[in-house]
């Protein structure tokens, strides 16, 4: 979950990771609809991209817990510099150029203490809530099928 | 932390155009070729040097930029993924004062193509001493006026003894380049 950052200028890497994580998982449509409640984004210059490439996803999927190359995934990235001179980066799975460009623009305004609060409240908080609600619904559905093997557990001990 | 404020090439076509121009320069030694490119490089890199680096360098290449620190190096690494190395191990060396060619990697007899390329930044062409260039790719001879010093020309003769190994040279000034492959003989007139 997101830390409560309302009204404060985030300086930590963890805060930036949190908002970039929320943006990367959101869809372009969700971001655009939330943008209506936010101030206008400043002008920007593209430094790199948007460009699509591959990255090796690694995970601990075996029983032994060793890292394993799961497979390559498609990622798209973009870096911009906005009118205030801040550099924003956007990375997301898939090949949606417009989405990563918007993530990069939002990353730049979120680093700015003057604009952070407005954009955080208008975009990041609702997107995080949408995602949390979606997960809660999935978990609630899964919980209905949860079976507790009381008897077996008792017999073993 | 990396601080990159300037864009690289706007699209792949610019990179392809520069590659074509560098190919022309290397196959027509001594010919001054102006790059048709709109690029703002970080100081003190010239447009030609920056464009050549963006075109030729990727993550498999080692680059030495002994005279550049900070912005120039960050910019190159950000846009190309280049690995920064010492001049002796580098595939590309960027300098405005020529280093001793004997200290650069000339390749091996089995892999002469692995020899280093020196990208030399000059204030301009058409000034300084006049040189006569002869060798493969030049029908009889071609004249080039460039601010290269006598010590460097003497050093360049080392390439004759090393053949087929050697160092290739790319002269850059403003947005113009001159290619001097290792097979070219340079004599002051």
Image (cartoon, rainbow, N blue to C red):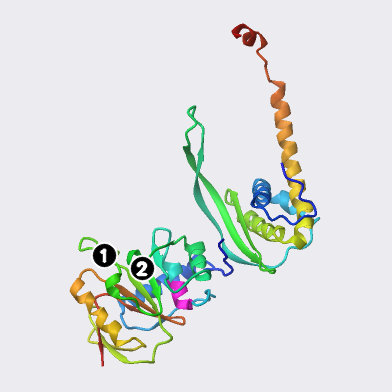
Are the residues tagged 2 and 1 within 8 Å (C-beta)? no
Q: Quadrant of residue A44?
A: bottom right
Q: Is residue B187 above or below residue B14?
A: below
Compared with residue B154, is residue B60 higher up or lower down, i.e. above or below? Answer: above
* Foreground pick, B17 / B8: B8
Q: Nearer the viewer, residue B7 or B139?
A: B7
Say which quadrant the C terminus of chain B sits in.
bottom left
Residue A79 lies in what quarter of the image? bottom right
Query: What residue is rendered at 30% in x and 73% in y?
Result: B168
Q: Position of residue A33 (x, y in %)?
A: 76, 52
| Number of marks drawn | 2
Taking the magenta stretch, the answer to whether it contains residue B184 is: no
The answer to whether one can see residue B185 in this image is no
Q: Nearer the viewer, residue B137 or B6?
A: B6
Q: Which mark is residue B107?
A: 1
Q: Which of the numbered marks, if any, corresponds to residue B29?
A: none
Structural crowding at the residue carrying mark 1, measured as other residues with C-alpha within 10 Å and reported as few (<14), some (14–19) or many (≥20): some
Q: Which residue is mark 2?
A: B87
Q: Please give the range of residues in magenta.
A: B45-52
Examine the rendered structure and indicate whether residue B169 appears above or below residue A39: below
Question: Where is residue B108 shown, x and y percent of the image?
Answer: 23, 63
Disc 2/disc 1 C-alpha distance (Å): 14 Å
In x, y percent, where is residue A34? 77, 52
Q: Residue at x 73, y 63 (%)?
A: A41
Is residue A63 visible in the rendered structure shown here?
A: yes
Q: Position of residue B188 (x, y in %)?
A: 26, 90
Using residue B188 as the reference point, say whether residue B146 is left or right of it. Answer: right
Q: Residue extending furthest top? A: A155
> Residue at the location (20% across, 63% down)?
B109
The main secondary structure of the magenta stretch is helix
Q: Secondary structure at mark 1?
A: loop
């Amino acid at each position: 979950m997101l830390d409560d950052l309302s009204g404060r200028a985030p300086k930590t890497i963890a805060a930036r990771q949190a908002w970039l994580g929320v943006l990367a998982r959101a869809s372009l449509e969700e971001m655009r609809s939330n943008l209506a409640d936010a101030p206008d984004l400043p002008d920007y210059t593209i430094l790199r991209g948007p460009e699509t490439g591959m990255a090796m996803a690694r995970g601990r999927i075996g029983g032994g817990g060793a890292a394993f190359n799961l497979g390559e995934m498609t990622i798209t990235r973009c870096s911009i510099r906005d009118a205030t001179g801040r550099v924003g980066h956007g990375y997301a799975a898939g090949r949606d150029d417009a989405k990563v460009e918007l993530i990069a623009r939002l990353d730049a305004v979120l680093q700015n203490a003057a604009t952070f609060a407005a954009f955080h409240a208008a975009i990041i908080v609702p997107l995080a809530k949408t995602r949390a609600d979606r997960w809660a619904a999935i978990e609630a559905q899964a919980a209905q099928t949860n079976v507790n093997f009381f008897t077996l557990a008792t017999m073993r001990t | 932390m990396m601080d990159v404020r300037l864009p690289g090439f706007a699209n792949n076509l610019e990179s392809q155009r520069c590659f074509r121009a560098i190919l022309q320069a290397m196959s027509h030694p001594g010919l001054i070729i102006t790059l048709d490119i709109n690029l703002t490089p970080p100081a003190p890199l010239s447009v030609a040097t920056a464009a050549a680096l963006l075109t030729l360098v990727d993550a498999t290449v080692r680059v030495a930029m002994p005279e550049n620190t900070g912005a120039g190096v960050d910019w190159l690494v950000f846009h190309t993924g280049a690995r920064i190395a010492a001049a002796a191990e580098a595939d590309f060396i960027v300098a405005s004062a020529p280093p001793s060619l004997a200290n650069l990697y000339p390749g091996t007899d089995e892999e002469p193509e692995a020899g280093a390329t020196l990208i030399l930044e000059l204030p301009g062409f058409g000034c300084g001493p006049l040189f006569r260039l002869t060798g493969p790719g030049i029908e009889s001879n071609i004249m080039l006026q460039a601010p290269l010093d006598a010590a460097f020309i003497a050093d360049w003769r080392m390439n004759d003894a090393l053949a087929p190994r050697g160092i290739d040279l790319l002269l850059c000034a403003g947005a113009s380049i001159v290619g001097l492959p290792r097979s070219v003989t340079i004599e002051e007139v």
